[in-house]
Amino acid sequence: MEPITDCGINLFADTLPSMDELNKLSDFAHSSESNLINFSQQVEANISRTSARSVLAVGIGLYIMGKSADAAEKLKKGNDCKEKFFYLAIALRRMGKNDEAIESLKKSLNHGADALSIRLETAATYREARNIDAAEKELKKCANFENVSADYHYQLGYLQESEGIYDQAMENYEKALDLFPNHQKAMFRLAFRCDLTGDEEAAIDYYKLISSTGSVHLNSLLNLAVLYEDKGQFDKAFQCVEKVLKYHPNHKRAILFKKDIESSKTMFFDEEKENKKTKKTQILETPISDFELSVRSRNCLRKMNIQTIGDLLNITETELLSYKNFGETSLREIKVILESKMLHLGMSLEERPPAVSIISESEQDSPNSVEEAENEAMYGKPIDDLQLSVRARKCVEKLNIRTIGELVHKTEAELLGCKNFGVTSLNEIKKTLTNIGLSLRNLD
C-alpha cells in the first residue's frame, strides 16, 4: 500500500514532527481502518532500524497503533527529548504503571515540554490512579489558566466528574467549549453526562456536533445510534452504524450493533412472558420492611445488608444462623415469608458454580492462587473502570450494579432482562470482562 501522505506528516522524516503534528497524525491514522493499516505498515517497515532517532519514531508509531508495551520498550532506547518522555508516560499510563508515568512526565518537562500540557497530563494520570488529592493539587498549579485554557477546564471537569460532582463538571465542560467550540473531548463528556441523566435530546445534539466535524468519532456515532434505537428511530441508528462500518468495516461492536438494530425492527414482544418476568422481579424486589418481623430479626437483616426478598435467596440457613443474635426463631420467621412466595433460602446459590476455594498454606505461592487473589482485588473496583458504552453503563446502573464483583455475579439472562439491553451490550461486557480474566456467572 502507499505510504501515508494525505495528512502531510511523515513520522520518519529527518526531523521529528512537532507535538501538534504528532497528534494530527494519530487522529488521521485512526480516522479509518485503511489509514491505520497503511500507518502500521510504515512503522513495521522501519522497526528494524537501530539509530536512536529511528527507534524513537518507531516507539511513537507503536504507541499510535495501540501497542503500549512494545512502544514503551522502544521509547526507552530512543534519544532523550520531551517527545520521548511524553509518549513513554502515556504508554505507561495505558499499561497501568502510573507512578512510572508520573516520573516520565517530569522528565519531559525537564526537556522543555509545555508546562501546562504536562501538568494537565500529570493530573489526568493521578485521576486514573484514583489519587484525587494529588490530581487536585496538580490542577491548582494551573489555576491561572482559568477562563483561558479549554484543556484546563476539561481536566478539571473530568476530575469533578470522577468525584461525583456532576453539575460543576458539566459547567467546566461547557466553559471548555466556550473557549474552544470544537473541543471534542469536552463535548463527548457533556453528551455522556446528559445521556446518563436522562437528557437524551441534549445528548443527541452533542453527539451530532461531534460527528459533524468531519472526522469519524466512533464512540460518538455508536452512542448516538444507541439513543436513536431507544427512541425507535431505527433508520437513523442504522445510518450511524453504517458510517462507522464505512471507514472501519471490521469494527466488531458496530457489526454486532448493526445486527441488533436489524433484529429490533422485527422483534416479537411476548406480553405474557414479560408480565411473568415483571411479576417475578416485583417479588424479588419486595423490601423486607413490608413484612411483620420481630425487632431482633429486622435488626439482624439490616446489619447484614439484606433488604429485599431477592437478597434472602443469596444466603443460606447456615450463614444466617452464624450471625450474632440470629437464632432459630428468626430463621423460622424468614422461612415462612419465603415459603408463602414459593421460595427458599439459598435458592439463587443452588445453580451457582462453586466459589473460589480457600487458598491453603501450601498453595499461597502458586500461580493460580496469585491469579485468584488478583481477581478478588478486581471485584471491588467500581464499574466505571470498565469504560463501558452509554447503553451498557445505563443498564448496569438500572440494575444497581456498582462494582465489577456485582457485575460478574450476574448471568447473561439477568442482563438481557433489563430494558434496552441487547446482544451488542452483552457481547461488549463479556469481551471487556474476558480482557481482565473474568466472566459473567454461568448457570450450566
Image: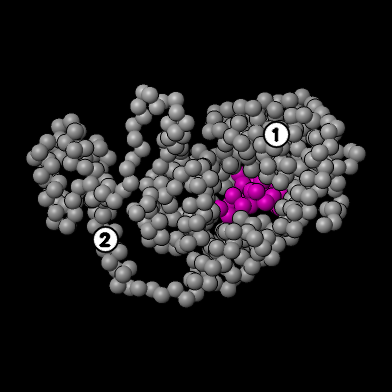
Expressed as whole percent of the image width and height from the top left, the position of residue 272 reads 30, 72
- Whichever of callouts 1 and 2 sits on the residue coming sooner in the sequence is 1
User: Which residue: 51% across, 67% down?
Assistant: 260
Q: Quadrant of the C terminus?
A: bottom left
**Residue 309 screen position, x and y as percent:** 23, 50
Check disc 2 and report the residue beneath it: 280
**Of circles 1 and 2, which is in front?**
1
Total label count?
A: 2
Q: How far apart, in angstroms, are the residues tagged by discs 1 and 2? A: 52 Å
The structure residue drawn at horizontal position 59% and vertical position 63%, both measured from the top left corner, is 255
The segment highlighted magenta reads 172-192
Q: Is residue 187 on the magenta stretch?
A: yes
Residue 271, picture quadrant: bottom left
Seen as rendered, the residue at the extreme right is 14
Residue count near mark 1 (Cα–Cα under 10 Å), binned few <14, some 14–19, many ≥20:
many
Instruction: State the SS at label 1.
Output: helix
Q: Residue at 57% of width from left, 47% of height from top?
A: 170
Q: Residue at x 59, y 42 (%)?
A: 157
- Residue 72: mark in rendering: 1
Q: Are marks 1 and 2 in contact (CB under 8 Å)?
A: no
Asked whether residue 19 appears in the rendered view, the answer is no
Helix, strand or loop for the magenta stretch, by majority: helix
- Picture coordinates of residue 389, whole percent (x, y): 54, 53
The image quadrant where one finds the N terminus is bottom right
